[in-house]
Amino acid sequence: MVVNPLDSPLGAIQVLAVGVLAVAANRKRLLNASGAFAAFVLGTTIIVTTNIFWLLLLMSLLVLAGIATRTRYEEKAARGTGEAREGVRRTRNVLANGLVPTLIALAQDPIDAWLGAGASSLLFVGSVAAAAADTFASEFGGLSEKTVLITTGKPVPPGTDGGVSLAGQIAALAGSLLVAAIGIVLLSLSFTWSAPPGGVPLTVTSLAAATTAGFIGCQMDSLLGALFEVRGILTKEEVNFLGIASGSFAVAAWLSVVGGL
């Protein structure tokens, strides 16, 4: 249900809060100026189409990604596996990680009509969990001593497109679980605190589905990296986008099998 945030003081305050968060992310060097503006646009779209709890989940991803990037950053930079510009995200990074969740927010009504009430909420959580899994895998896997190509199992240098490691896989699962748990709690609160969209049931099944979807999205990211990014067919951001989309598709497939939440 799309609402005009300016119809009420609370709505206007929420949009203002998006701007404040974007500025704060820029000041903390999580985003550059253009990235902060892109985040404001996506955040405002989510606020207008859903509510503050959906946005808080996406903001938690930004904070956790920043923490993961800056963990032992000097060591990763020396090995050539650290994010450029000390992990400050730009517009294309914001769009790669935030566009799929925003599209899900925009399409919540047809998604819920297709997969059942509240399905869009779980797809949203699964997509954000996929983004977290990929970020954690890259940042902590970049510290691993042994990396292999996902398609062949042959050893490759850390940071190679499509390279995976045990540490990276564990980090991916942990990142997906952490964000999925935050998302399930937030969107459960969304259901009890506000009107539509419907929330996600606070159950072990929903948590497992979102976590698994996030992990699957990360594996798809690695696979696409090994097949297409390494050949210059796809960019890193395009691979990220498709990996995150895969996470949401995994949730949709699960819901199609179980018949809704």
Image (cartoon, helix red, strand yellow):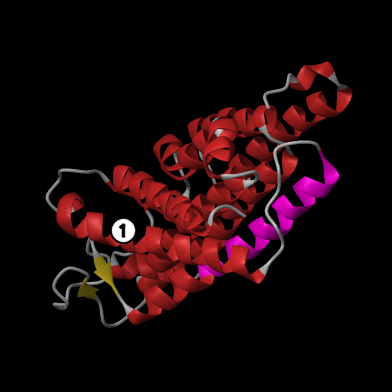
Quarter of the image containing the C terminus? bottom right
| Residue 153: percent from left, percent from top | 17, 77
| Residue 151: percent from left, percent from top | 17, 68
| Residue 66: percent from left, percent from top | 54, 57
Tell me which residue sits at (46%, 58%) in the image: 257
Q: Kindly identify which residue carries mark 1.
A: 220
Tell me which residue sits at (20%, 50%) in the image: 229
User: What amino acid type is highlighted by mark number 1?
Assistant: Met
Q: Please tell me whether residue 122 is drawn above or below residue 197 in the rendered image.
A: below
Q: Which residue occupies the foreground of this view, 110 or 70? A: 110
Q: Which stretch appears magenta?
A: 175-194
Tell me which residue sits at (46%, 60%) in the image: 213
242 left or right, relative to 180:
left
| Residue 48: percent from left, percent from top | 68, 27
Image-quadrant location for residue 235: top left
Q: Which residue occupies the foreground of this view, 156 or 214? A: 214
- Whether the magenta-drawn stretch holds residue 176 is answered as yes
Q: Which residue occupies the foreground of this view, 25 or 5? A: 5
42 left or right, relative to 5:
left
Say if residue 209 shows up in the picture: yes
- Whether the magenta-drawn stretch holds residue 104 is answered as no
Main SS category, magenta section: helix
